[in-house]
Each structure stands twice: as C-alpha cells, then as structure tokens.
Image (cartoon, grey):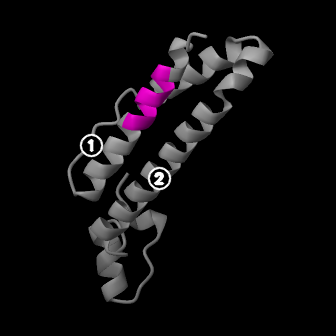
Amino acid sequence: MTTHPLHADLAAVAAALAEAGAQAEAGAAIDLAGLDASVADLCAAVEALPRGEGRAFRDDLLALLAALDRLAATLTRQRELIEGGEPHSARQRAAAVYRRPATAADEPS
C-alpha cells in the first residue's frame, strides 16, 4: 500500500510549525508568511478527497491542529513577555501613570 503524498505534506507543515515554535521559544524572530495559505491548501486538498479517503487523514489533521495550537500558545506567551502586561501605546502608558483612563479620542487616527 502506498502512502498518499498529502500525508508527507501535512507532516512537513506540522514539522515546520514545531520548528517555528522552537525558534520562538528561543527568542528568535520567525517568518510565518504563507503559512495560512499552505494550511488552507492542504485542508482543501483533503476535503476534496472522497469521504473514505479523507478519513485516512484524520490523525494528520489532528497533529497539524495540535502543532498550530502549540505555536499559538508560544507566540501568545512571547507577546505577553514582550508587552510585560503594559498598555500598548505611549499615551495609554502615560494615562496609566496619571490614573486617567485613555479613551479612543486620545489615540491618533
């Protein structure tokens, strides 16, 4: 029995996501350009298969979903570390110091 090429493609994207997560954990910048298109293309390719064939990709898709979830959690933690829980803009930080809540009208357009 031959393995469908989509199995390898899904595994490759999951591995790339794991590597991106490891790089993000190490503090390196990561490039996720095209990731959404790759995942969408793979999902569409699996969805286009006959139902019986598509079911064979369940574990691959679950592994891809888990890799995406881990990367999202890593990036969320990294963002929180960078932001340090502080408000985003200088105006919001200044307002916090002076205990006056910043409003949308305070922000430049």
- Magenta stretch bounds: 8-15
Q: Nearer the viewer, residue 50 or 31?
A: 50
Quarter of the image where one finds residue 96: bottom left
Query: Which sits in the foreground, 72 or 23?
Result: 23
State whether residue 40 is above or below residue 31.
above
Seen at 39% across and 26% down, the residue is: 34
* Percent x, y of residue 31: 28, 37
Q: Which residue is tagged 1?
A: 30
| Amino acid type shown at disc 1 | Ile
Residue visible at 53% across and 22% down in the picture = 7
**Which amino acid type is shown beneath numbered disc 2?**
Arg
Q: How far apart are labels 1 and 2 at the CA level? A: 15 Å
Q: Earlier in the sequence, mark 1 or mark 2?
A: 1
State the residue at coordinates (48%, 44%).
67
Q: Name which quarter of the figure residue 52 lies in.
A: top right
Q: Which mark is residue 42?
A: none
Compared with 40, 91 (above or below) is below
Q: Against 58, is 106 above or below?
A: below
Q: Is residue 65 magenta?
A: no
Q: Which residue is mark 2?
A: 70
x%, y% of residue 1?
61, 10
Crowd class of label 2 (few under 14; some 14 to 19; many from 20; radius 10 Å): some
Count the labels in the image. 2
Q: Identify the residue at image location x=33%, y=89%.
A: 98
Bin the neighbour count of mark 1 within 10 Å (Cα to Cα): few under 14, some 14-19, many 20 and up: few
Residue 106 % position (x, y):
39, 67
Prevailing secondary structure of the magenta residues: helix
Q: The residue tagged with tag 1: helix, strand or loop?
A: loop
Q: Position of residue 63 (x, y in %)?
A: 55, 40
